[in-house]
Structures are given as structure tokens and as C-alpha cells.
Amino acid sequence: WVNTTGKAIGRGHVSKIVDSVAVKNSGGLIALTALLLNSWNASNYLAQAGVLEGMDEQRIYDTASAKLYAGAALVAVIDSQVSKNARFSIGLATTPLRTLLGGILGALSVTAAFNEFYSLQLQLENAQGSIDPWLKMRRNIVGGQIVTWGAVALNGVVFTLRALTGNLSAAMALSRFLFWMGPLNFLVVVLGVLYLIAWYFQQKPMQNFLNDCCWSKSRARDLSPIAFDTQQGELDRLYGILYTPRVSFESAEPKSVMNALQSGVMTTAIKTLTIDLPGAEPSNVYLDITMIGNPLDTLAMRERIKSGEGKYAGEEPMQDIGDCWIH
């Protein structure tokens, strides 16, 4: 489907995209696009997590949120395939399948929104100096999404249980579930649009600094003397923005490792590592890199170390492997 769609886009054949069997069978172009985008986002986070020894708290929240949103998008595509008359039974009780899927969709989405909320809260708490109002607005919008998705989950769970307990017929449970989903879907769309606006206008660190520093236009009307500590603090922030080193990497495709201790194990490695030193001059820069690890690191050896057996029992097998890795 990806190859066909790519060729259709290149030739300008819109009908081949909109009328594609894959699009129609997955609930339409919007549902499939949401699934592809969320899956791509989750795969990026998982690829980075696979090669990192550890992740900070913000990255953990972001990765969990991306995975949960991808799962919610998949449930939404499955829900679009389910007929309104689809039922499932537990014993003698019967309930609509769509109410159950709605509850699962809401539960996954509200958990994902909670993780994103915690990530944004950490960014606000770690912000130095002024706080970007768009970032704060984005945090508040995610808070609204938590409430909305929680209502979606509650709507699905309540009418699923009422149908299972015989309090409502399956048809009546589905009817009331869809009735409440109307305004909830409207809120989801509105909050989604507001989220995209806040995300688009969210300022970069340099923009945020320039808007609130001692020399900014917003503070030009205040002619009172500026404390030396304030000026020095802002200068330190500027140096941090301009000259803090940045590290990025590209992970290689997973490959199978075969040796005496393990066989057929899929492992992911770092393909390229880029270290950016803004403002540095090659003639006066000395860069010292130390990479810590174990050249013989295997799953079998890790298990032996954890259990206290083998050659490295009670010892720290890590060593400098920079010479082995850097070509």
C-alpha cells in the first residue's frame, strides 16, 4: 500500500489514494493516517530506547505516551471495521463490541495523555528563567485531553458493564454509548486542533530567551537599573543555549548475533554518533571521549552476572571500549 500510494502521489492520482482498498478497509484516510503517524512516532522512540543504556524521566514518559497513542490509533482502526450489530458474549450476557473497544480506546488514550502531561510538567519545572506560555498552554490542553479521554473510557466501560449485567439491552447500550460519544468526539477534535496550534507556536530556547531577557522589547519600558546578578544569570543562560554540546546518533538495523554463548539473538547498535560543539574552533579544541561497556556483552553473560555465577561474578565487567568502537 505504501509503494502504491507513493507512486500515486508522485503522479497526482488522488483517486488512487482516497479509493485505495487499504484506506477504505481501515476506516478512511484520517484513521489510517493517524495510525501511521503514531506508529512512526512510537518506532522512533523505541529505536532510540533500544540503543540507550538508560533514559531520563522525560524520555521515559515521552516513549510511553508514543506507544500508548499508537495502540489507541490501532484500536480506532479496528473499531471502524466493527459492525454496529457486532456482539460478544460472556456466559448468557451479551454486550456490543463497539462499547468495549471504545472503553479500551479511551483507557489507552488517557494513559498516554497522563504520560505526556508528566513530560510537559518536567519541562516546565526544569525551565530556567521565564516559562514559554505556549508550552504552558500545551500542558493545560493535555490536561483537558486527560479529562476528555477519561470520559470516553468511562462511557465505554459503563455501557459495556450495564449490557453485561442485563441492566440494558445490547442495542440500547450501543445507542446511549453513541449518543454520548457525539459531544466527546467534538471535544477531542477541538482539543486536538488547539494542541497543534500550541505545538506549532511553541518557542525554541533562544526565542524564549530573547523575548524575556534584559534587552528584550517587552522590558524596554522599564528604565530602572537591572541587578548585576540578573544580568549575569541571563548571560549564563545565553552561553548555555549557544555553546552547550549536543549529541545525536543513528541506530543501525537490528541484526542477529551468533557466538558460543548465544545464538539467534537480535541486537541493535549505534550506526553513527554526532557530537556538535557550537562555537568551537578546530585548532584549539581538545575532545576526550570515553565509552564504557563490555566488548563481550551477551544476554547469557548478563544472566550469569545477575545470578552471581561465572568469571565476572561479583566484579564489574565494564571497561573503556572507545578504541574498539571508534574507527
Image (cartoon, grey):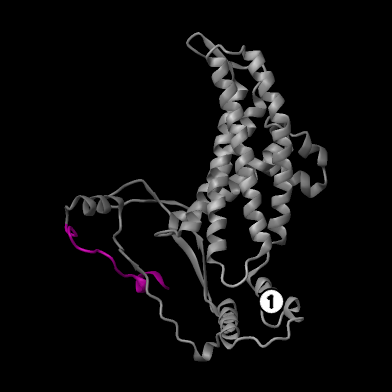
Residue labelled with disc 1: 210
**Residue at screen point 78% across, 49% down:** 10
Q: Quadrant of the C terminus?
A: bottom left
**Secondary structure character of the magenta stretch overall:** loop
**Residue at screen point 67% across, 32% down:** 26
Q: Is residue 263 left or right of residue 204?
A: left
Q: Is residue 167 left or right of residue 137?
A: left
Q: Nearer the viewer, residue 152 or 315?
A: 152
Q: Is residue 207 left or right of residue 236?
A: right
**Residue at screen point 69% across, 51% down:** 195
Question: Given the image, on which type of amino acid does mark 1 rest?
Answer: Leu
Q: Nearer the viewer, residue 158 or 1?
A: 158
Residue 288 spot, x, y in % from top left: 41, 80
In the displayed orientation, state which residue is furthest to the front: 224
Is residue 146 inside the magenta stretch? no
Q: Is residue 5 above or below residue 271?
A: above
Image quadrant where residue 22 sits: top right
Q: Is residue 17 above or below residue 80?
A: below
Provide the residue span drawn in magenta.
311-327
In the displayed orientation, state which residue is furthest to the bottom: 283
The answer, for residue 256, to whether it is visible in the render is yes
Residue 100 spot, x, y in % from top left: 57, 25
Indicate the secondary structure of the residue bearing disc 1. Answer: helix
Residue 19 spot, x, y in % from top left: 78, 33
Residue 116 spot, x, y in % from top left: 56, 51
